[in-house]
Amino acid sequence: MAEAQKFVPGDEDYEEEFSFDPRLEQEAERIAEALVFASAQPISEAYIAGRLPRGVDVGSVMARLKNRYAGCGVNLVQVADHWAFRTAADLSFVVNTDEQEVRKLSRAALEVLAIIAYHQPVTRAEIEDIRGVQTSKGTLDVLMEAGWVRFRGRRRTPGRPVTFGTTRDFLDHFGLEEIRDLPGIEELKGAGLLSGRVPSNLNIPVPIGDDEFAENEDPITQMDLEELGLLTPKAEEDD
Amino acid sequence: MAEAQKFVPGDEDYEEEFSFDPRLEQEAERIAEALVFASAQPISEAYIAGRLPRGVDVGSVMARLKNRYAGCGVNLVQVADHWAFRTAADLSFVVNTDEQEVRKLSRAALEVLAIIAYHQPVTRAEIEDIRGVQTSKGTLDVLMEAGWVRFRGRRRTPGRPVTFGTTRDFLDHFGLEEIRDLPGIEELKGAGLLSGRVPSNLNIPVPIGDDEFAENEDPITQMDLEELGLLTPKAEEDD
Amino acid sequence: MEPLWHDESARRGLHEDELVVDIAGFEGPLDLLLHLARSQRVDLSRISVLALAEQYIAFVERARSIRIELAADYLVMAAWLAYLKSRLLIPQPAKDEGPSGEEMASALAFRLKRLEAMRDAATKLVNRNRLGRDIFVRGAPEHIVTERRSDYDASLYDLLTAYAALRQRQAITQVTIEKRHVWSLGDARLILARMVGSLDDWTALDHFLIRYMTSPKERATAIASSFAASLEMVREGRLEIRQEGAFTPIYLRRGPNPIDAATLAEMEAARG
């Protein structure tokens, strides 16, 4: 493409007045485009100009770029003497959906979730026993609401406490095929998640999958669910 | 052209047998462009498809879009079944703002990362077999924390060891569309270097963990030795 | 390209004629072997395994002579290479299934090639255009797409770290007695299983093991554990044992019921 220009590299006479080299202009457009794209804030024209090849006029580069994006899903917009990309106004409905921001699970919720995953079927009393602190109803509610934890059944012990387990969504979200894919103690150690000095009294159970019930567990019934629906006192938060 | 559109996805009128309506296709392109452009994270093709006008083929929309951006300062790239806009690689020198630091990995961690990437799904024992050395604590840990490596599942062999694999973030970070794009992977496969097993079931010594004992095993003590009458050190052995 | 593995002899404290100083520069015996193999300056598929075995053994001898402690791994490899060397030098009569010296040598060459291939791959990988260094994302994203059905986010890594930390915290911490450097019976058994599996002839195997132990402390445990383990294995018919008289070398060979590859794999898996 260069040969079309009659441009002799290094020839001093030509360097100054040569005002339009398509190759250079295109390169300048690409640079400006990448700069504006990658910048966290609207970026000043002066800054862009400083990074363009010499002899290129930043104003016309930006004008062409703006023009190129005019009909697109994204537009190049100028704010004072700064440039930024913005979603085309008529498409804001695609981008600005009503999605609320994803919330990070609290430490407490993560711990309870992990205990339920590994120790299922597990009762609330057992969860508290393992954690050594009381679990607020709120924490379990959050996990239920997230769709990761469910009532599994009832333990065949006095009081018939409800047992908790994980859901299919839980497996999907955490990329597990089945609950037994959770790493065991040796594997946690091997991956560096448990430190080398693991006390000998630390046992990690093999979780019991969805399809089976523990020996002393009864499936949950519709009646149980209704009953449980009645007892959802509102939570005292735990962290 | 923008003002002409005002298209609402799912609008019943457009729904039916339009095999190729240029206006619809163009609108689809704008929507996909806006969606992907607005996000820093790759967006799944399924998610995009769900927001396009019905009857439009997401695959061809993305292909056209990718093509349109091919020579630009910003490119549309595919990461597994996701799409993202990224600055063009050749513009690295202009965009590079030395404020972001790319995670530095140790030699061992990189080696493990490569082994996991090329051999996945791979167990820890296999990684150690390839490297001929135990994986030190903190190596896998670092790779998982970086979000490049994950537990994948379990091998269906005795002991059901957990397997490791790479993540989409890994592909994104190293600019790979899919695992098959790993440099030289076909040649390595062709040379039989990824088959995993050493030909003819030969066993070359593999590392032993000298820092741990099996759960149910106690170290031998000096006393045991004397008791067994086994302490017959062959003097100071030759050389 | 930013090289990751150059043969920086100096950095590793290794010099052509004056071998050995810093074993810590190597990541295990295979790494050391690969380094030595490269110094033969040939394609790995045309490498002389015999020469390599000799070099390695010389390296280990040298380390002993200047009283550098070598980890058990290096010594086990030395013993194995010594055995391999004997197999290569004295061709076996075509007896039963046991792999020939050539087969063993080619297996070793394969492992070296595979390790080197993975290193090259790692180098290529790390030198690719990388996100955040060469390639950049949209600096001012306008939204965060939530494709999840859940409003909450957590990764498996988060989950496992939380669980591991919790369990560790809750477990009663015990007094740990200072760790002693010992070979457990399990270690010894595994080492014997690996090595004796292919021994057709009477070999003073304990001699190999002990010969390369540098610290006297470790010597006692190595003798004791491997002897105790060998008795157990004789009982199981895994190997046969012979000793001419008190304090004479103990010879071992494969027993009538040798450990096959599958059993060995199980043993290794059991050790995790």
Image: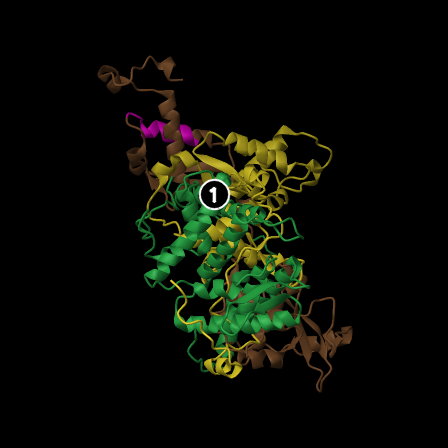
Chain colours: A brown, B yellow, C green
Could you tell me which quadrant the N terminus of chain A lies in? top left
Residue at 39% over, 53% down = C58
The subunit letter for the residue under badge 1 reads C
Whether C186 is drawn above or below C153: the answer is below
User: Does residue A88 appear in this view?
Assistant: no
Label 1 is placed on what type of residue?
Ser
Q: Quadrant of residue C130?
A: top left
Q: Residues within 10 Å of mark 1 (few under 14, many from 20)?
A: some
In the picture as drawn, the residue positioned furthest to the left comes out as: A12
Residue A24 location (% of width, % of height): 35, 24
Q: Quadrant of residue A64?
A: top left
Return the residue at label 1: C48
Q: Is residue C208 left or right of residue A112?
A: left
Q: How many marks?
A: 1
Along the line of sight, the residue nearer the viewer: B185 or A216: B185
Residue C35 location (% of width, % of height): 41, 48
Which element carries disc 1, helix, strand or loop? Answer: loop
Whether B173 is drawn above or below B224: the answer is above
What span is colored magenta in the figure?
A: A55-66
Residue at 53% over, 72% down = C245
Residue A238 magenta-drawn?
no
Q: Is residue A15 left or right of residue C151?
A: left
Whether C133 is drawn above or below C257: the answer is above
In the picture as drawn, the residue positioned furthest to the bottom comes out as: A158
